[in-house]
Amino acid sequence: MSIYTTVGMAAATLLALSGTAQASDTKFDYVKAEGAENGEKKATVEWKATAQAGLLMTTGNSTATTISSGFKASRKAGQNRVQLELDGAFARSTIYLANDDNENDVIDENELTRITKTSSKNWRAKIRYDRFLSPHNAVYTSAALSADEPAGKELIGTAQVGYSRIVVDTKVHQLTLESGYDFSYEDLSGSAKSVSIHSWRVFAGYQGKLSAGTSLEISTESLFNLNELQTSSGPVGELDDTRLNNQVSLTTSIYGDLSFRFSFQSKFDNNPAPRPKLSLPYATSFAPLADKLDTRTEAAIIVNFL
């Protein structure tokens, strides 16, 4: 499939989104500014902020430390909304290794060692701006920095721009579709070649209220590369570096501003990066790639600040 065909598909998607609303547009609400004169009006400002954190530590026969955290904040004033997201996860564990150096088929006292390894180390910082053309139509732009060292990606820079449409908007259900352009720069581990990826982005997000205090969120983001990539393992053609980011989360209120959230995330990369270096170098003819699929299951306490 050529770049022009793919861009045509993106344009067709935008046109389809623009005409498929299932809820009638309504005007933005405004309130009178304090001290305003001559009927001046001021856009309603809506703030939201939540934070979550998790910690698990064990010592003794089993030694492990797992930390996860996240923060989200948004500000909406009239037709403008700015969102900030920060999250990360870190896991480190100590395990025993046996090495039969004298080849006597048993483990002697000096043949048992303990090593400490980092099994998870990733973080992300993202900022996004939405300009609402109407309550259900918006254009957006975003920028993000992230890293995932176990997956062989020391730094990822991302910029996006596109069109967002709320196609279902009721008191119980909300469905949002987005289509646009994504640029990603990946600084890979070791001597692997860094890559710049131009992609067509398609996103679908659902929010539903299961009850007064329980909500369900489901989202999927698809990135289809439009350019050919030159990687350490050889050339990668158009649409051969498909990346899928999915998330499902269930949140229920506990008491006041405290909530409990259970979430599952999956990241699929059809063209994964080379694995990071180990204590010994890989053989010249051996360049193992990271796994295509990463998942993360998390249970966390949420605090709503605003």
Image: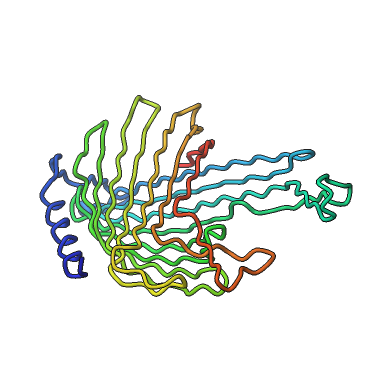
Percent of width and height locating residue 69: 55, 47
Is 17 placed left or right of 48 in the picture? left
Is 263 placed left or right of 75 in the picture? right
Q: Is residue 41 above or below residue 251?
A: below
Q: How is the image coloured?
A: rainbow
Please, which residue is most extreme toward the front here? 104
Residue at 82% across, 52% down = 103
Q: Is residue 51 above or below residue 183?
A: above
Number of on-image labels: 0
Percent of width and height locating residue 138: 23, 55
Quarter residue 272 falls in:
bottom left
* Figure quadrant of the C terminus: top left
Percent of width and height locating residue 112: 82, 49
Residue at 45% across, 49% down = 72
* Figure quadrant of the N terminus: bottom left
Percent of width and height locating residue 252: 44, 29
Residue at 55% across, 75% down = 191
Q: Which of the pair 169/122 is nearer the observer?
A: 122
Please, which residue is most extreme toward the right here? 109
Q: Which of the pair 181/28 is nearer the observer?
A: 181
Q: Which of the pair 281/50 is nearer the observer?
A: 281
Please, which residue is most extreme toward the top here? 211
